[in-house]
Image (cartoon, grey):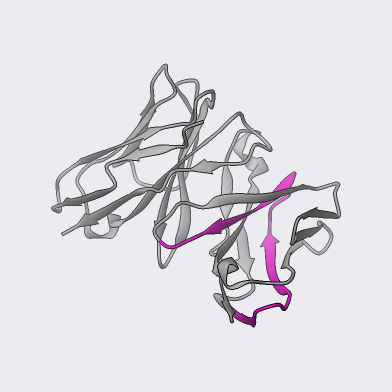
């Protein structure tokens, strides 16, 4: 079974631009979560989607948004990029809510200059 | 405020010894707790899950304990090997999330096993 796929692997953007990251979950997984990882803050929860609905959101500004499609693939968008948005963005899928382990992709490394 | 603390940022041990990593949490009432391993440049990989009514769980050389009174989990790697060198993350569910999947992670402990 193919794992979680995130594209692109690396991205360099300029302050003020916007970016869209993509995540394809494991087949059959309907829950997709997004995390931001930085050296200082560790893994920070962004949001979680299930069946195209956002069920939970972390403490991030409205510039961070996401969506999920009917095939469970998910995208996240960051608008008006700031230097502090430079991070590894990780997507994780799981079978369902509750006690299902998260299966992570290898992330998209975003650098904002 | 809610906090998940892992005992140290880094831990060095000699090959063959048992590594013990600690995860303490505050203001959470998790139904379960998970441990993940992360290698540089890669996403975390799930290792073990333990439920609130379980005291201990084992998988090969790994053992996890969960004490809901102390609000603590211990993660042990016995007969450690250099290949076990990685960052280990504990994670727990946030029951304030309405019962839906919202897993919060600790900041991790970087384990270095010295040959």
Quick check: A96 above or below B4? above
Would residue B49 be found to the left or right of residue B81 on screen?
right
Would residue B107 be found to the left or right of residue A69 on screen?
right
User: Residue B89: within the magenta?
Assistant: no
Q: Nearer the viewer, residue A16 or B38?
A: B38
Q: Position of residue A52 (x, y in %)?
A: 44, 21
Q: Nearer the viewer, residue A82 or B59?
A: B59
User: Residue B35: within the magenta?
Assistant: yes
**Would you say residue A55 is visible in this rendering?**
no
- Residue that sits furthest to the top in the current view: A70
- The residue lying at 65 percent from left, 36 percent from top is A100
Quick check: B86 above or below A111? below
Would residue B96 be found to the left or right of residue A93 on screen?
right
Q: How many marks?
A: 0
- The residue lying at 42 percent from left, 18 percent from top is A71
Q: Position of residue B10 (x, y in %)?
A: 55, 77
Q: Position of residue A89 (x, y in %)?
A: 37, 49
- Could you tell me which quadrant the N terminus of chain B lies in? bottom right
- The residue lying at 20 percent from left, 56 percent from top is A112
Magenta-colored segment: predominant secondary structure = strand
Q: Which region is colored magenta?
A: B12-40
Q: Residue A82's image quarter?
A: bottom left
- Could you tell me which quadrant the C terminus of chain B lies in? bottom right
Q: Position of residue A76 (x, y in %)?
A: 33, 36
**Would you say residue A2 is visible in this rendering?**
yes
Q: Nearer the viewer, residue B64 or B24?
A: B64
- The residue lying at 39 percent from left, 58 percent from top is B41
């Amino acid at each position: 079974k193919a794992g979680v796929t995130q594209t692109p692997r690396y991205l360099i953007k300029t302050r003020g631009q916007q970016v869209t990251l993509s995540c394809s979950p494991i087949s059959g997984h309907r829950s997709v979560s997004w995390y931001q990882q930085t050296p200082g803050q560790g893994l920070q929860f962004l949001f979680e989607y299930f069946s195209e609905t956002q069920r939970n959101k972390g403490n991030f500004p409205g510039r961070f948004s996401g969506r999920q499609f009917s095939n469970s693939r998910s995208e996240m968008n960051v608008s008006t990029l700031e230097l502090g948005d430079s991070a590894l963005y990780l997507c994780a899928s799981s079978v369902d809510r509750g006690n299902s382990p998260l299966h992570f992709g290898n992330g998209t490394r975003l650098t904002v200059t | 405020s809610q906090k998940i603390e892992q005992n140290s940022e880094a831990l060095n041990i000699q090959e063959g010894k048992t590594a013990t990593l600690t995860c303490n949490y505050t203001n959470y009432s998790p139904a379960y707790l998970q441990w993940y391993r992360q290698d540089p440049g890669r996403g975390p990989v799930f290792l073990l899950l333990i439920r609130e009514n379980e005291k201990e769980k084992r998988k090969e050389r790994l053992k996890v304990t969960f004490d809901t009174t102390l609000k603590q989990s211990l993660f042990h790697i016995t007969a450690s090997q250099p290949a076990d060198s990685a960052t280990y993350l504990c994670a727990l569910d946030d029951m304030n999330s309405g019962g839906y999947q919202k897993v919060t992670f600790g900041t991790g402990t970087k384990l270095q096993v010295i040959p």
